[in-house]
Amino acid sequence: MKKDMTKLGMTLMLFASLACASLAVVYAFTKESIDKQSEIQLQASLKELFPQATAFEPIQDLVSPDPNIKFEAAYEVKSDMAPLGLAMKATGPSYGGAATLLVGIDLHRSIAGVRVMALNDTPGLGMNASSPTYYVDKTKKVTFLGQFNEKFLTDPFEVKKDVVAITAATISSRSLTKIIKLAGDAAIAYMDQKAISAPAENGASADAGTDANAQPQAGGK
Amino acid sequence: MSMKKLYSIFKQGIIFDNPLLMLMIGLCSAIAVTTNVSNGIGMGLAMTFVLLFSEIIISLFRKLIPSMIRIPIFIIVIAAFTTMVDLVMKAYFPDLSKSMGVFIPLIVVNCIIMGRVEAFASKQNLASVIADALGMGLGYTWVLIAIAAVRELLGNGTLAGIQIMPASYQPILFFILPPGGFFVFSLFISLNIWFKKRMEASARNRELVAKKEAA
Amino acid sequence: MELGKIFLLALLTNNIVIMRFLALCSYIGMTSDVGQSIGMGFAVTFVTVLATAATWPIYHYILVPLNLTFLQILIFILVIASLVQLVEFYLKKNVPGLYSAMGIYLPLITTNCAILAVTFENISFKYNFIQSIAYSVGVSLGYLLAMVLLAGIRERMKTSPVPKFLQGTPILFMATALIGIAFMGFSGLIK
């Protein structure tokens, strides 16, 4: 009896080890590609938001005021040393778990664009936020995230009044809007603090983050 | 093993013993991924891959698997292949992988795979199980594509993301929503039952005619 | 997210059976009797919460530090299978009545999509341990709710004139679609 049990146990261990070994092989093959995927997506989206950018410098000290929404990464966007704005990668709760958005803020304190990094909402409803063919304004072909383009962070952000919600997906719409607003406000606070602003009217580009009171504050709000 | 016998095994899974419509197993992932055709195709292929290779391995090792621990061993094999599909999809088809989410790992508890492995693969030779897996996989996939086509076309105006309906078509959101899924699925089952009854009726008729002629 | 919100979303708005199509095999198979569905619902709740309590720490304290996350599917399903075995042994010894009533459906809990889905989502939704427990309780009670609802409807339907083309399983899915439309009313429940 005991010998049988040992034999059964050994067979089980053998199969389990074979399985784990083959999985380790497949994992080794695919790991690089998998890790690259999120980097590729991030870089591609950053480029989409700021086509003229040449560098994205990571910033460390941005903290979210809301414990539920985390700023996973923040970048100062520059084109040959001249600032273009900020990009924030923020994660917050949405209808189907955590949603990660990339929010770009330009020097005018308006939204350069929003891209979805990760979204787990209901297909056909909340997931439409990431769909390029779902329009909140069918005549002007504006997507849900597209409506945030060039919107000032000081504008009202109430869903269903100032922000068009996705049909039958109000919770997703609210959650995503909240993430965008929070990320946008934090980015502006940072830019104000470091005095990063649009270049002066006469064409001279503003210095990034040195003299807080010397630079003319042209453009912006 | 004659080609004719292999072909009849293959044919079973497509209509007569269609896993989704006739045997009613593996339903879990089925309705959820049918919101669009791309997901349906992806799921069908992923499931067929896991089914095929699980059946192959278990058929090859069938004499070496002790009956007492066969279920854990089946689980280990199926889980291994499911993980492989998951890893490969994450690496080379990231958009599809994200779109299907948790349903790829859920292939491991797909009753179809466990059912076929237990009932068929553990007892049959290699050629038969390959025919069986391909037949069942195809049966599963075509139903997924059919349901997804209806739901996506009526609920979104597109097929696999390509606009089919004219721009003026107002999509009937109901079909994309969960209740719509149940609704469409219910009609498919009903159609299949009716079809099966007709096939059986005509088979009986042919028998009666044959008996009459023999008499 | 607050625990109450997670729980309510899982129980009603995102009901695992009615709105997410999971656990359908047992949903169709075990709802011919209200008593049976309650028993099954509680058995699944028990296994799901235990599975969460086991798999969450395994993932965060063993798989991640050792870089073995690719073994997640394998380990999780084996944990669930073992838990179901334990439940089976326990019932066989201590509650033989329930054990024989559940019959073949007890081992089938292992292949219940809902349980594996919950253990996976605890990880992918980045819930902490307490949130995971709240989520698993919400989902499994939602499963219980769906089961009892359909069982009740089936008992009523025994004396209803069902149109011929919907007899058998189709009418059950139709009923579920209708329940689903009602459940969509819960989408405004959480602000």
Image: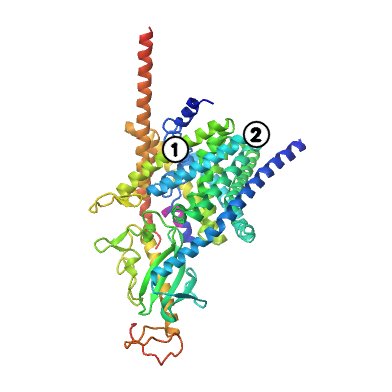
Q: How is the image coloured?
A: rainbow
| Foreground: disc 1 or disc 2 | 1
Residue type, numbered disc 1: Leu
Q: Residue B95: x, y in percent?
A: 44, 56
Answer above or below: position of C7 versus C103.
below
Going by the image, does A140 lie left or right of B206? left
Asked if one can make out residue C147 in the rendered structure from this viewpoint, the answer is: no
Q: Quadrant of residue B120?
A: top right
Q: Looking at the rendering, in which quadrant would you find the C terminus of chain A?
A: bottom left
Q: Secondary structure at mark 1?
A: helix
Name the mark on residue B138: 1
Q: Looking at the rendering, in which quadrant would you find the N terminus of chain A?
A: top right
Q: Residue A89: x, y in percent?
A: 46, 69
Residue type, numbered disc 2: Ser
Residue closer to the observer: B161 or C34: B161
Residue at 37 percent across and 70 percent down: it is A113
Q: Which residue is mark 2?
A: B67
Going by the image, does A112 lie left or right of B47? left
Residue sitting at the far left? B168
Residue sitting at the far top? B215
Provide the residue span drawn in magenta. C8-13
Q: Quadrant of residue C189?
A: bottom left
Asked if one can make out residue B140 in the rendered structure from this viewpoint, the answer is: yes
Residue at 37 percent across and 61 percent down: it is A129
